[in-house]
Image (cartoon, grey):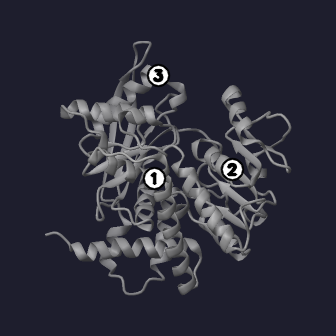
C-alpha cells in the first residue's frame, strides 16, 4: 500500500458512513422540532465550504510522494470555525464533512462562539520519519492557509497529530504572516502559548459527564466498574481520572487488543507498560480480550474512546453496561442507538461527552488573543462548570420533551445555530 492510498482496514459489520450517520442524527432531531424554516434547515444540513489539496513532499530517500488532504468548514454562523486535523490512512472527505458538522453541534451544545470544521491528510504518520512528518505538516499548512486564521478557522490536534504538529502549523502560518500568531491553532506546547490542562481536557470532560450521569442514576463513581475501548490520549486520560475518583477500571484496549481484570487494573502501570511495549496487550496480571469482547462486558460504564462504528446492529444487543459515554466520534451507529435505547441503556452522546477538548481549546484561543494565561486549576474549574452546565441544559430538555440524551443535545445545538442564523439574517 502506498502512503497516499486509503487504508485497507476492515470495516466492522453494520458500519455506517460517518456522513450518513451525522445526517441521520440531524434529521431525526429536526423531525421533532416543528416551526423551523425549511430553507435554514437545508442550509444547516450542508457544509459551508470544502477544500481538497494534493501536495508533494520530499521524502528522506530523495523521492517525492503526493498526499491528499482536506479542510472542511461546516458553519461559521456563531463564530470562527473550529476543528481538529487528523492524520490517518482512513481519512475520507465524507468523514471530514461529518466531523465538521459534529463540531458545529459540539460547540453549540457547550455554547462556545465557534462553528465546526475538520481537516485531515490521508497518511499513516507512523510510516513517516520525524523530518518527513514535519515537511508534510508544513506543506499541508501552506495549502490550507487560505482558510485558517485566528479570526476565521482555528485547527487543533486529532487522531495522528499532537502538540508538536500544532507547533509546526503555528510556525508555518507565522512565517507566512511575518509575525508570531499563536491563536491560529490550539493544542500547542506550553512553551509557545499552549494552555494548562489542554492535554487532559478531552478525557477530563468525559469523566465529568460520566460522574454526573452516574449521580443522576442514583449511583456513585466510587466503586463503579468501567471498561474503556481505546487507550490513546483520550482513553488513557479517562481511565486515569476515573480511577482517581474511585472507579475500578476492569478492561482497556487499543488497536492491538485488550486486557481484563475483574478486580481492576493499575492504570499508571498500564500506561508505563504501553510506553515500553507499544500496546496494552500482555500486561501482567490481566487476561487478554478483543475489542469486540470488551464492549460486551458487564460493567457499570462503557466508554468507547477509539473510532467510529464500534457498536452496530450486530453487537448492540450484547451490550450490558447501563451507561455508555461516547468519548469517540460516532462510535454507535443509528441502528445500534435504537437497540440500546430499547434496552434502557443511557447513552451520553459524543456531541456532549467529548466536548472537553474544544472547550479548553476555546480557553487557549482566548488566552492567545489576550496574551494572558490561566493556571491549570482555573482551566479545570472552568471546564467543569461549562460541562456540567451543558449537561444540565441537555438533561432538562430531555425530561421536558421526553427524548433521549442524544436527541436532546441536538435540540439544544440546532436551536442555537438556527437562532443565530435568524438573528444574523441571510446575506445580502
Residue corresponding to mark 3: 130
| Residue at position x 45%, y 55% in the image | 99
Residue 92: give its label: none
Q: Is residue 346 above or below residue 75?
A: below
Mark 1: few, some, or many residues within 10 Å (few <14, many ≥20)?
few
Q: Where is residue 59 in the image (x, y as percent from the top left)?
A: 42, 18
Q: What element carries label 2?
A: helix
| Residue at position x 48%, y 34% in the image | 123
C-alpha gap between disc 2 and disc 3: 34 Å
Q: Quadrant of residue 70?
A: top left
Q: Position of residue 289 (x, y in %)?
A: 81, 44
Please tell me which of labels 2 and 3 falls first in the chain: 3
Q: Position of residue 321 (x, y in %)?
A: 75, 64
Q: Is mark 3 on a helix, strand or loop?
A: helix
The one nearer the camera, 153 or 223, is 223
Q: Is residue 52 left or right of residue 381?
A: left
Q: Position of residue 183 (x, y in %)?
A: 30, 44
C-alpha gap between disc 3 and disc 1: 34 Å
Q: Is residue 278 above or below residue 217?
A: above
Residue corresponding to mark 2: 244
Residue corresponding to mark 1: 378
Mark 3: few, some, or many residues within 10 Å (few <14, many ≥20)?
few
The answer to whether residue 94 of the structure is visible from this angle is: no
Mark 2: few, some, or many residues within 10 Å (few <14, many ≥20)?
few
Task: Say whether marks 2 and 3 touch (CB < 8 Å).
Answer: no
Amino acid at each position: 500500500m502506498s502512503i497516499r492510498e486509503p487504508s485497507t482496514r476492515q470495516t466492522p459489520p453494520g458500519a455506517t458512513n460517518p456522513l450518513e450517520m451525522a445526517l441521520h442524527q440531524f434529521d431525526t432531531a429536526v423531525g421533532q422540532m416543528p416551526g423551523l424554516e425549511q430553507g435554514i434547515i437545508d442550509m444547516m444540513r450542508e457544509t459551508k465550504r470544502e477544500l481538497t489539496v494534493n501536495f508533494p513532499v520530499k521524502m528522506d530517500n530523495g523521492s517525492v510522494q503526493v498526499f491528499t488532504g482536506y479542510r472542511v468548514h461546516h458553519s461559521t454562523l456563531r463564530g470562527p470555525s473550529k476543528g481538529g486535523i487528523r492524520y490517518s490512512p482512513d481519512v475520507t472527505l465524507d468523514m471530514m464533512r461529518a466531523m465538521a458538522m459534529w463540531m458545529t453541534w459540539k460547540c453549540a451544545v457547550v455554547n462556545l462562539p465557534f462553528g465546526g470544521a475538520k481537516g485531515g491528510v490521508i497518511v499513516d504518520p507512523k510510516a513517516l520519519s520525524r523530518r518527513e512528518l514535519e515537511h508534510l505538516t508544513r506543506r499541508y499548512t501552506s495549502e490550507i492557509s487560505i482558510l485558517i486564521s485566528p479570526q476565521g478557522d482555528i485547527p487543533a490536534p486529532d487522531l495522528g497529530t499532537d502538540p508538536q504538529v500544532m507547533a509546526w502549523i503555528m510556525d508555518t502560518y507565522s512565517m507566512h504572516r511575518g509575525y508570531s500568531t499563536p491563536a491560529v491553532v490550539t493544542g500547542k506546547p506550553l512553551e509557545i502559548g499552549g494552555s494548562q490542562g489542554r492535554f487532559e481536557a478531552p478525557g477530563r470532560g468525559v469523566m465529568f459527564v460520566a460522574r454526573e450521569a452516574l449521580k443522576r442514576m442514583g449511583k456513585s463513581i466510587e466503586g463503579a466498574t468501567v471498561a474503556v475501548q481505546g487507550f490513546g490520549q483520550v482513553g488513557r486520560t479517562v481511565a486515569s481520572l476515573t480511577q482517581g475518583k474511585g472507579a475500578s477500571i476492569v478492561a482497556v484496549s487499543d488497536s492491538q487488543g485488550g486486557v481484563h481484570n475483574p478486580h481492576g487494573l493499575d492504570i499508571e502501570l498500564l500506561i508505563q507498560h504501553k510506553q515500553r511495549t507499544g500496546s496494552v496487550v500482555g500486561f501482567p496480571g490481566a487476561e487478554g480480550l478483543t475489542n469486540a469482547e470488551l464492549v460486551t462486558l458487564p460493567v457499570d460504564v462503557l466508554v468507547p474512546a477509539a473510532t467510529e462504528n464500534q457498536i452496530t446492529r450486530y453487537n448492540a444487543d450484547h451490550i450490558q453496561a447501563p451507561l455508555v459515554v461516547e468519548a469517540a466520534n460516532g462510535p454507535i451507529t443509528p441502528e445500534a442507538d435504537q437497540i440500546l435505547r430499547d434496552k434502557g441503556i443511557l447513552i451520553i452522546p459524543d456531541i456532549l461527552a467529548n466536548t472537553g477538548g474544544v472547550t479548553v481549546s476555546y480557553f487557549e484561543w482566548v488566552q492567545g488573543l489576550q496574551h494572558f494565561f490561566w493556571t491549570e486549576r482555573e482551566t479545570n474549574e472552568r471546564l467543569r462548570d461549562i460541562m456540567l452546565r451543558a449537561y444540565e441544559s441537555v438533561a432538562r430538555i430531555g425530561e421536558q420533551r421526553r427524548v433521549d440524551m442524544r436527541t436532546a443535545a441536538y435540540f439544544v445545538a440546532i436551536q442555537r445555530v438556527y437562532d443565530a442564523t435568524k438573528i444574523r439574517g441571510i446575506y445580502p
